[in-house]
Image (cartoon, helix red, strand yellow):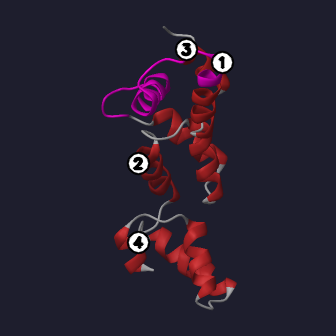
Amino acid sequence: MLRLLSRREHSRLELSQKLMQKGATPEQITALLEYFVARNWQSDQRFAEQYFNSYRSKHGEFRLRQSLQSHGIDGQLIDMVIAHADHPDGNSELDRARAILLKKFRTSPTNANEYKKQASFLYNRGFSFDLIRKILKEP
């Protein structure tokens, strides 16, 4: 487990699953994870912050939230990470969505088909419908 954690942060759920694959019993897994948490070698908060900061330039908050939940991160911790995330250049989610859309499409939609394509792209990246409408209505 130390080798895994030395490469990157892992959530408690990820480590638990990896230990189960190696044949550890639930009692062993719990004891080992508690030992690592007590020494601050494993932290779900640290994992969530690093994950969020690594992927926020590519994805919207909805997708990031779903991803973190699939890694076993608690909803309150996710809310805290999203609320306190400091992006180095201060970009809001609206600014990030604009940048992602511009990188992919270069121009605003000129017809309904292009609008649908760009809206679908942003939705699949995890941005809200309100944000998508706001961006695509801009000239």
Quadrant into which the N terminus falls: bottom left
Indicate left or right for 87 with 34 as reference.
left
Viewer-closest of 39 and 57: 57
Indicate left or right for 85 with 32 as reference.
left
Compare marks 2 and 3 and give the one earlier in the sequence: 2
Compare marks 4 and 1 and give the one earlier in the sequence: 4
Viewer-closest of 40 and 112: 112
Residue marked by disc 4: 5
Residue marked by disc 3: 110
Q: Which residues are magenta?
A: 87-115
Viewer-closest of 127 and 31: 127
Mark-to-mark CA distance, 4 and 1: 48 Å
Compared to 126, does 94 lie above or below? above
Compared to 128, does 80 lie above or below? below
Q: Residue at x 63, y 91 (%)?
A: 23
Question: Which residue type carries mark 3?
Answer: Thr
Does dot 3 land on a helix, a strand or a loop? loop
Q: Is residue 93 magenta?
A: yes
Residue marked by disc 2: 54
Mark-to-mark CA distance, 2 and 1: 33 Å
Q: Residue at x 53, y 64 (%)?
A: 11
Question: Which residue type carries mark 1?
Answer: Ala
Is the residue under label 3 in contact with that under label 2 (CB below 8 Å)?
A: no
Mark-to-mark CA distance, 2 and 3: 33 Å
Q: Residues within 10 Å of mark 3 (few under 14, many from 20)?
A: few
Residue marked by disc 1: 112
